[in-house]
Image: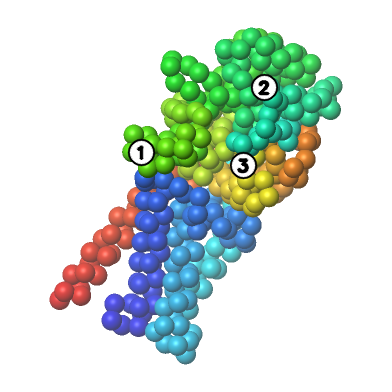
Amino acid sequence: LRGRWGQVVVVPLLVGGLWTLRETVMGSWPYGGFPWARLGMSQATSPFAEAVSWVGVTGMSFMIATVCAGIGQWWRVGRGRDWRGLVMPAAVIGLLLVVPQFPTTPAGELTVGWVQGNGPAGYFDAAAPGAMLTAQTAASIPLIGQPVDVLVWPEGGVDSDPLNDAGTDAALDELSRQASAPLLVNAATRRGGNTYNTSLLWPAAGGVVQLFDKANPVPFGEYVPDLWFYQRIAPDLIGLIGREYTPGTNSPYVSLNGVGVGLAICFDVIFDDVIWRGAQDGAQLYLLQSNNGDFRGTDENLQQAAFARMRAIETGRSVVNVSTTGTSQAFAPDGTLLDDLPADTAGARVTTIPLRTGLTPAVTLGTWTAGLLAATSLLGLLLLGFAVRR
């Protein structure tokens, strides 16, 4: 690495790999990790975004970090005098610009009604019992009579357990009957002594309700890890958390009259394995449910919209991202915005959603990308250590 080319080529590659390794660790530990701030996700609206269908978000992080490190090293080593030092970052940028999105196969269309009720969804919002159900139902009324294949509500759109509350069960049955379509709703459910954050595909004419439980409840928001420890440090603060959600283990996939639907509930959208598993299990589109009520007035919901767009491009599938309070969006498989609803507004949309089959390399390779980058980076660091000692 003492030569100029080692400094402007090998060092940036090593930095990119180590950056990606740091993101991988941060995104999985502790308590399941927090992969919200990955560098790759920042490219959701950039001209580089299509490459994510080949390398995934992890690969995108590696390439962006490598480019930045390459430019930095070029300036540090030669003070910008030798333009040949920009060959490597320029090559990566050129590759990111020209690589098209990996194609997936058209498989028809689905007409999706989606509803943003703008109810009292925040943790500390004053709300009467059933207020969210009432708000979502009221916002759904304009869709009655319009032909839809499914009616989608956001996370927390139902504020009582429809599996154990007869009144809520009846209300959903009635709305489904009026809409002549199944509902995809979300509620806290109690099963087997555990509480889950659950998406429920509620059939229009009775029958089996398909379930998906949130795989990644938010630490210190939806459950308290190591409760015995944190309870002693901040008992009043910990006492504000009213439920202890259990992580779900079922597939993020439901079958909607033969159409495969991938699911993710709010925080789940930033976890690769949830998204990949949906596509691997046969999802032809994604219906994402989120609750942004506690983040009114911030850019959190816009960040989540960027994640949804990136997932559409990464998987080559349409994504409908429905929020309690907004913003909500529908994206085509190439990330094009099909329709949206602004924040802090009650409303509903009916959108014709393209369906796709086939897996992109990002989904097929899955965790192999992160594993290969991590192993290569550690090996490079080890070899560098030996070289320095010699």
**Which of the numbered marks, if any, corresponds to residue 294?**
3
Q: Earlier in the sequence, mark 1 or mark 3?
A: 1
Is residue 362 placed above or below 2 in the rendered structure?
Answer: above
Q: SS for tag 3?
A: helix
Q: Earlier in the sequence, mark 3 or mark 2?
A: 2
The spot of residue 154 in percent (x, y) is 65, 32
CA gap, disc 1 and disc 3: 26 Å
Image disc number at residue 232: 1
Q: Is residue 10 left or right of residue 189?
A: left
Contact between marks 3 and 2 (CB within 8 A): the answer is: no
Report crowding for label 2: few under 14, some 14 to 19, many 20 or more residues within 10 A (C-alpha): few
- Residue 152 horizontal side relative to residue 254, left or right: right
Give the amino acid type for the residue marked by disc 2 in the picture: Pro
Q: Quadrant of residue 76?
A: bottom left
- Nearer the observer: mark 2 or 1; the answer is 1
As rendered, which of 131 and 201 lies closer to the eye? 131
Residue 150 in view, yes or no: no
Q: Are marks 1 and 3 in contact (CB under 8 Å)?
A: no
Q: Amino acid at mark 1?
A: Arg
Task: Please indicate, yes or no, whether residue 337 appears anywhere in the rendered image.
Answer: yes
Quarter-wise, where is residue 72 in the image?
bottom left
Toward the bottom, the furthest residue is 81
User: At label 3, which amino acid type do we have?
Assistant: Asp
* Residue at 84% in and 27% down: 142
Which secondary structure, mark 2? loop
The residue drawn where x is 47% and y is 43% is 272
Label 3, label 2: how far apart the Cα atoms are: 18 Å
